[in-house]
Image (cartoon, rainbow, N blue to C red):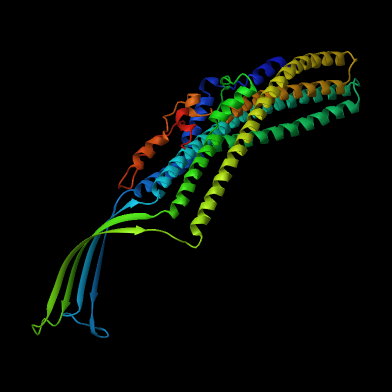
């Protein structure tokens, strides 16, 4: 039977993942930029980081004076329910300014811990950015893979429909048996079911793309080559231990826990504060109608100091110290756990890349060999040296090889980005995305020293990456 399409040309087009209308196709860079700007998980994490920034502003407020006023007014009654308009009226107004002088180091420990948690939060923001952009890369390549598989299965159905028609024609002239027709019919039914399943997977991939990127995929272009990867797995592990955001975040959490221990220990130390009060008092006594009433007006001012020396708190301070030390031990162990997880992720991604590349090489050989096998089997079937089942099996083997090649190319690309994400390098800045940078320091700097006001400066959307010199060394 003469084939009306070229398997070699189809495979080349599909495996290159080149869609129709490529001139107006969406690119991977555009999809990543859209995810970066609109993904709600990422924008929510930025808001969460701004909330963490406020902990530093709160800690700084402990060093500043407080000013407050209090006013009271009292009126006596001559009898229940009857107001005495001329007697028993008292007005007190007071103003207090107070300032902590020494708090046992608690204020400084609180501030230092807050600073470390801000740095930890920035790393968590980087981690979210890496995860969301990796999800976008995965969704992009899943759509391309599933589009290719739908096309392969659609063409397989078309070929088997032709095969069935040819088998029926040959059966009419007695060239093949009813069994041959039944085999062709069964393979066509199976191919149609596989196409339906492939379409369902494509629909799921498109929805995952829409959820991550924020819009439906339209004529996706072939992705660009992978960014440069480390030369060896050991180099990748070393980079990950230095730059992985989750690992850096865990180190900052431990540094914050160190200051929490100092904060708990400060409960054993004395505190000293000073204050000044200004007061006004007006008291109305007697009856003004009998000209016997009088009022007392008094202005007062005082300056004082308060020294508190703790001796015994029922064991509360010791319990808080033990709790803080235990939480620091937990944070230290968590660093080890995260480091092991990062190492596992790097090794797994590395092996997935190597496996996918080996699969690609084998699948390319299999596709070429199976294309020749299909053509040869068809010709041999025409001269009677092969039966219909041999042709159907050869076509199925070719489809399997093409499917493996399309899938392996997707797996290699996604595994490459998974390795980069483990290194902390799937970020807008590292990928040169066309977006305006999001700098978490903008909001932090606007609120850290703020004395009053309800608003801070929210930066534009963009990269959350911060310099290595800033993030890799938690404070002592």
The answer to whether residue 194 is visible is yes
Side of 143 relative to 59 (left or right): right
Observer-nearest residue: 116 or 426? 116
Q: Residue shown at 69%/32% (left/top)?
A: 198
Q: Position of residue 143 (x, y in %)?
A: 61, 30
| Residue found at the very far left of the displayed protein | 291
The foreground one among 189 and 22 is 22
Query: With respect to residue 211, does 228 lie above or below?
Result: above
Residue 394's place in the image compared with 271, above or below, is above
The quarter of the displayed image where residue 353 is located: top right
Q: Residue at x 59, y 37 (%)?
A: 208
Q: Quadrant of residue 176?
A: top right
In-front residue for pair 182/264: 264
Image quarter in which the N terminus is found: top right
Residue 19 picture quarter: top right
Question: Which residue is most to the front?
Answer: 311
Residue at 23% from the left image edge and 82% from the top image edge: 77
Q: Residue at x 75, y 23 (%)?
A: 399
List x then y, in percent, for residue 275: 27, 57
């Amino acid at each position: 039977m003469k084939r009306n399409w070229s398997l070699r040309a189809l495979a080349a087009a599909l495996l290159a993942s080149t869609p129709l209308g490529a001139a107006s196709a969406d690119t991977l860079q555009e999809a990543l930029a859209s995810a970066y700007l609109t993904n709600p998980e990422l924008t929510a994490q930025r808001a969460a980081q701004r909330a963490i920034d406020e902990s530093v502003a709160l800690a700084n407020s402990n060093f500043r004076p407080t000013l407050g006023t209090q006013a009271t007014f009292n009126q006596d009654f001559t009898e229940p329910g009857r107001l005495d308009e001329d007697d028993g009226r008292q007005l007190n107004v007071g103003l207090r300014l107070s300032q902590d002088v020494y708090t046992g180091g608690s204020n400084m420990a609180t501030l230092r811990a807050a600073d470390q948690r801000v740095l930890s939060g920035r790393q968590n923001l980087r981690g979210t950015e890496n995860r969301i952009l990796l999800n976008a890369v995965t969704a992009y390549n899943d759509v391309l893979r599933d589009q290719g598989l739908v096309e392969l299965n659609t063409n397989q159905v078309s070929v088997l429909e032709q095969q069935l028609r040819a088998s029926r024609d040959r059966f009419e002239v007695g060239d093949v048996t009813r069994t041959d027709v039944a085999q062709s019919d069964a393979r066509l039914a199976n191919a149609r079911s596989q196409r339906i399943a492939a379409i369902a997977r494509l629909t799921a991939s498109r929805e995952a793309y829409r959820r991550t990127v924020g819009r439906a995929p339209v004529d996706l272009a072939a992705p660009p080559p992978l960014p440069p990867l480390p030369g060896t797995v050991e180099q990748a592990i070393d980079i990950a231990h230095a730059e992985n955001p989750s690992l850096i975040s865990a180190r900052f959490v431990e540094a914050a826990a160190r200051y929490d221990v100092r904060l708990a220990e400060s409960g054993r130390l004395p505190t000293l504060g000073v204050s000044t009060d200004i007061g006004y008092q007006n008291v109305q006594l007697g009856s003004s109608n009998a000209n016997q009433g009088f009022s007392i007006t008094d202005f007062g001012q005082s300056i004082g100091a308060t020294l508190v020396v703790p001796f015994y708190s029922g064991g509360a301070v010791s319990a808080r110290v033990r709790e803080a030390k235990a939480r620091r031990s937990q944070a230290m162990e968590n660093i080890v756990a995260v480091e092991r997880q990062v190492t596992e992720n790097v090794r797994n991604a590395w092996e997935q890349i190597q496996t996918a590349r080996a699969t690609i090489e084998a699948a390319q050989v299999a596709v070429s060999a199976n294309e020749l096998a299909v053509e040869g089997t068809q010709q041999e079937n025409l001269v009677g040296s092969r039966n219909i089942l041999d042709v159907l099996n050869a076509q199925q083997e070719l489809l399997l090889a093409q499917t493996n090649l399309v899938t392996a190319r997707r797996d290699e690309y996604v595994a490459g980005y998974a390795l980069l994400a483990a290194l902390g390098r799937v970020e807008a800045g590292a990928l040169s995305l066309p977006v305006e940078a999001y700098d978490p320091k903008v909001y932090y700097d606007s609120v850290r020293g703020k004395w009053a006001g309800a608003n801070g400066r929210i930066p534009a959307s963009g990269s959350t990456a911060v310099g290595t010199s800033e993030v890799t060394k938690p404070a002592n």
